[in-house]
Amino acid sequence: MKKHLLFLLLAMSMPLFAQTTTTYTQLYPIGGTATQPRRIFSVTFDQGADSYWLEYNTSPYAPGYPSCGSTAANPENESGLGFIFLENTIIGSTQQCWELSSAAGNSVTFSGTAEDGRHFDAVYTFNYTTTRRCGGSGRGGTCHTVYTFSNGVLVVTKQ
């Protein structure tokens, strides 16, 4: 009987320690004028997830650069690498901002505490390409660099 009770208690506690990984795929390419830091707006993922703003720099900003404004989750950007706003993910349904813990040319990582109180780790990988475009005719034409942001995959693992 004691063995069965121990097994039952162990089986009931398994969901408390289970890890959940969910992958979100970017649905459409995004384009715009390239800036430094990189700013990407209005990314739509499958499963109803969205990122309305990703801003990142591959080298740190000045210390104390604001990341998410004065939200309770992130009062200031300690890493100096940027931030991402997300909604409708396993992290939570409401729009939240997360400070980046790393940023490379084609990926960013971040972590925190989800709405349900569980810790999460996330990595967002994507293609970021730039092209130099010139418009106008003659000597009055202007040139600028445009980007294409595509094939993004957001992977979130909750503990």
Image (cartoon, rainbow, N blue to C red):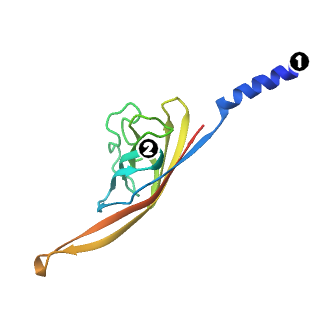
- Residue 52 lies, in percent from the top left, at 34, 46
Above or below: residue 91 compared with residue 152: above
Count the numbered circles shown. 2
Query: Could you say which is closer to the camera, residue 23 or residue 134?
Result: 23
- Residue 123 lies, in percent from the top left, at 51, 50
Badge 2 amino acid: Gly
- Residue 63 lies, in percent from the top left, at 35, 46
Q: Residue at x 31, y 38 (%)?
A: 69
Asked if the residues shown at circle 1 and circle 2 are in contact, with their CB atoms under 8 angstroms apart, the answer is no
Q: CA distance from mark 1 to mark 2?
A: 47 Å
- Residue 46 lies, in percent from the top left, at 46, 49
Describe the element under mark 1 as helix, strand or loop. Answer: loop
Badge 1 amino acid: Met
Left or right: 139 as drawn, with respect to 121:
left
Q: Residue furthest bottom?
A: 138
Q: Residue furthest top?
A: 1
- Determine which quarter of the picture holds residue 135: bottom left
Q: Which residue is mark 1?
A: 1
Closer to the N terminus: mark 1 or mark 2? 1
Above or below: residue 153 compared with residue 11: below
Left or right: 53 as drawn, with respect to 113:
left
Q: Residue at x 65, y 29 (%)?
A: 16
Q: Which residue is mark 2?
A: 48
